[in-house]
Amino acid sequence: MELFFLLAVLFYMLSSGWYFAFLFFQKKRLRQVGCAMLAAGFVFQTLEIAIAFARAGHVPASNLHQTLAISAWALVGAFLVFQYRYRVNILGIYAAPLAALILLASAHLPRATAAPVSLFKSFWLLVHIVTIFLGDAALTLACGVGILYLLQERAIKRKSPGFFFRRLPSLDRLDTTGHACIVTGFTLLTIGIITGMIYARAVWGHFWSWDPKEVWSALTWVFYAALLHERLAVGWRGRRAAIMAIVGFAVLLFTFLGVNFLLHGHHGQFMKPSP
């Protein structure tokens, strides 16, 4: 199992190098190799997660090490799907290094957990974790697309084309891709919150307990719901949508990590190892 984890880290790092080369030289072959290495790393990490699941009998998300590892896996999986659908090839320069950094960070974290194993053996928790992680991954990609949009917009407004002008997709494609990421992420986040409430009812006896994680998850959901509403009702597109996607990622990041370390609640026990 450790071998598959190390291979995933290696291929994510190699993929990052190839994507950086693609950014500078714009050769199709470089992008193809980078994507193939990222896919190979994804396969190795999928095997590692599957083995951990089979051994433990539950989804391997019982500590911060496993949580970050699954985050990297979900990010790569979401990227591969969106890259195939929307052909924003240069987004790999964002997804591959980020996944590599997350996985490297997880490798240096303790692997013990204080949470009882029985808490993880639930169908609703499985659905909750999978949908939340994939939803977060899609919203993370939306942030990356937003950054690319702002870079391309700035390049277009300059009198002379700069480094990014010929290397980034059109503003329309970036806007469409970013919106698709947010719609997908918001849908999965909604399913994740609902299944989380069902799981909470089964374990703690109530759907909602005002746990800090629950509150911030609700705030994150409201933020993206408002963003989607404003796009439909007012026509928020382009620069404004890109900026809000980046702001939304900051909220998402605090919900995912900040709450567990700065506030106390049910979810904190899954993230902090036993002494």
Image (spheres, helix red, strand yellow):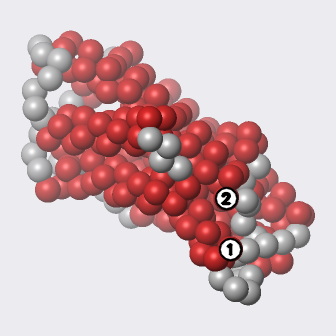
15 or 136, which is in the foreground? 136
Q: Residue at position x 34%, y 49% from top?
A: 252
- In the image, 258: left or right of 25? left
Q: Secondary structure at mark 2?
A: helix
Res. 88 in view: yes
Left or right of 213 on screen, residue 123: right
- The answer to whether 139 is drawn above or below residue 32 in the figure is above
Circle 2: residue type = Leu
Residue that numbered label 1 is attached to: 156
Give the residue displayed 68% in from the left and 40% down from the top: 81
Residue 114 visible at all: no
Query: Label 2: which residue?
Result: 171
Image coordinates of residue 129 in percent, x first then y, are 39, 31
The residue at the far front in this view is 234
The residue drawn where x is 83% and y is 77% is: 25
Q: Position of residue 211 (x, y in %)?
A: 12, 35
Image x and y of residue 226, in percent? 35, 39
Q: Nearer the viewer, residue 256 or 121?
A: 256
Amino acid type of disc 1? Ile
